[in-house]
Amino acid sequence: MDATHAKRMSATTAPAVKARLVELFKGVVDGETEVWFNRTNTEHQLNENVYVLGVKIDREWKNLGRPSPHQREENYLLEVDVEVYQAGVDGETVENRMWQIVEQLDNAISADPTLGNQENVQWVLVEHIEQHSEGGSDGWISKATLEIAVKARI
């Protein structure tokens, strides 16, 4: 990695936190659930997927005066989509399965809310969940969007 790339990567903790969440989520979901670093453009099964998506970052200075390590605080929301699809007419089963996956992700974060102090993370929390289900001619899809709040220092 060249110096420019290293400097750009240290501009925020978000890429490292996002990668750590993908790793963490892969370790807790059932085998039939796939976890992705973003929405994939490759062929994949549509039944059960977790997509770790975009980030909205707010920053502020915490120390005044001379520059010092970890003087900028980042507060950001990281978006994660959970999608479960099943053929047929049983929307309740599809939605219940989606909630099981959401619970697996939430429990993983709750068990280690600093992600092992990954990238100076002070805490991580599933702050908001928006869910909806929809039936179609060939089956049901249930989706949840999680907003994961992160507080870190750089």
Image: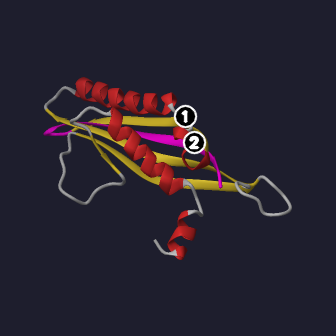
Q: Nearer the viewer, residue 120 or 12?
A: 120
Q: Nearer the viewer, residue 134 or 12?
A: 12
Residue 71 appears in which quarter of the rendering? bottom right
Q: Going 28% across and 56% down the picture, which residue do you hit?
A: 40
Q: Going 57% across and 50% down the picture, which residue do you hit?
A: 119
Is residue 149 within the magenta segment? yes
Q: Going 32% across and 54% down the picture, which residue do you hit?
A: 39
Rendered position, 112 above or below 152: above
Magenta stretch, overall SS: strand
Report crowding for label 1: few under 14, some 14 to 19, many 20 or more residues within 10 A (C-alpha): some
The picture places residue 130, in percent across and down from the top left corner, at: 45, 37
Q: Which mark is residue 117?
A: 2
Residue 89 appears in which quarter of the rendering? top left
Rendered position, 101 above or below 58: above
Classify mark 2: helix, strand or loop. helix
- Position of the C terminus, as image quadrant, is bottom right
Q: Going 57% across and 62% down the picture, which residue do you hit?
A: 10
Colouring method of the image: secondary structure
Q: Which residue is mark 1?
A: 113
Q: Which residues are magenta?
A: 136-154
The picture places residue 27, in percent across and down from the top left corner, at: 34, 36
